[in-house]
Amino acid sequence: MNSLSPTLSRKHARKQTNRCADAALSACPCGGSSPCCDRYHEGTPATDPESLVRSRYSAYVKKLDAYLLDTWHPDTRPASINFDDGAKWLGLEIKKSAQESTYTATVEFVARFRIAGRAHRLHEISRFVFEDGLWFYVDGQFPNTGE
Ligand SMILES: [Zn+2]
């Protein structure tokens, strides 16, 4: 009896831990582990362009239009963000990030998403500028259109 009860209580403890739910809570849409983009969405400035790409990708997933507009340079910022309600974002892959000077950088990435069952791939080289202590998204080029 003495040797049996600890085994029982361990089993009970394990049953209460839902590992799948834990993983879903800690994983960030961008593929990073928590704390990841949430802190940027909550107001901490992204310290480098790659973090900004990640947090902006996650913001698209979570439909945080205010964050997307705030991190968009005023010169190129659209009036509003149109989210495609049918798009299901599948993942982000950072290909290359390069800081050309103190104030300019580019990040090449591929974002995958699905619309109406069809898989799509957004391959973009984004430009960023550093102004007033913050990184801003300026615009993007699409190196392999037709892919
Ligand atoms: Zn993230």
Image (cartoon, grey):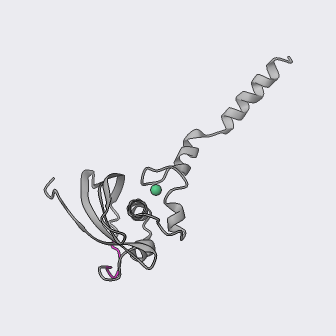
Horizontal and vertical percent for residue 135? Answer: 40, 71
Horizontal and vertical percent for residue 41? Answer: 50, 67
Q: Nearer the viewer, residue 60 or 34?
A: 34
Horizontal and vertical percent for residue 10? Answer: 73, 29
Identify the image quadrant of residue 145.
Answer: bottom left
**Looking at the image, which residue is at 25% across and 57% down?**
122
Q: Nearer the viewer, residue 137 or 48?
A: 48
**Looking at the image, which residue is at 79% across and 24% down?**
6
Q: Quarter holding the N terminus?
A: top right
Counting every numbered tag in the picture gives: 0
Residue that lies at the very extreme toward the front in this rendered image: 101
In the figure, 8 relative to 78: above or below? Answer: above
In the figure, 16 relative to 1: above or below? Answer: below
Report whether 71 appears left or right of 124. right
Magenta segment, which residues?
77-82
**Looking at the image, which residue is at 38% across and 64% down?**
49
Q: Nearer the viewer, residue 30 or 74?
A: 74
Residue that lies at the very extreme toward the right in this rendered image: 2
In the figure, 6 relative to 117: above or below? Answer: above
Q: State yes or no: residue 127 in magenta.
A: no
Q: Nearer the viewer, residue 62 or 103?
A: 103
Report whether 46 appears left or right of 12. left
**Looking at the image, which residue is at 57% across and 45% down?**
21
Query: Could you tell me what secondary structure mostly forms the magenta stretch?
Result: loop
Horizontal and vertical percent for residue 100? Answer: 30, 65
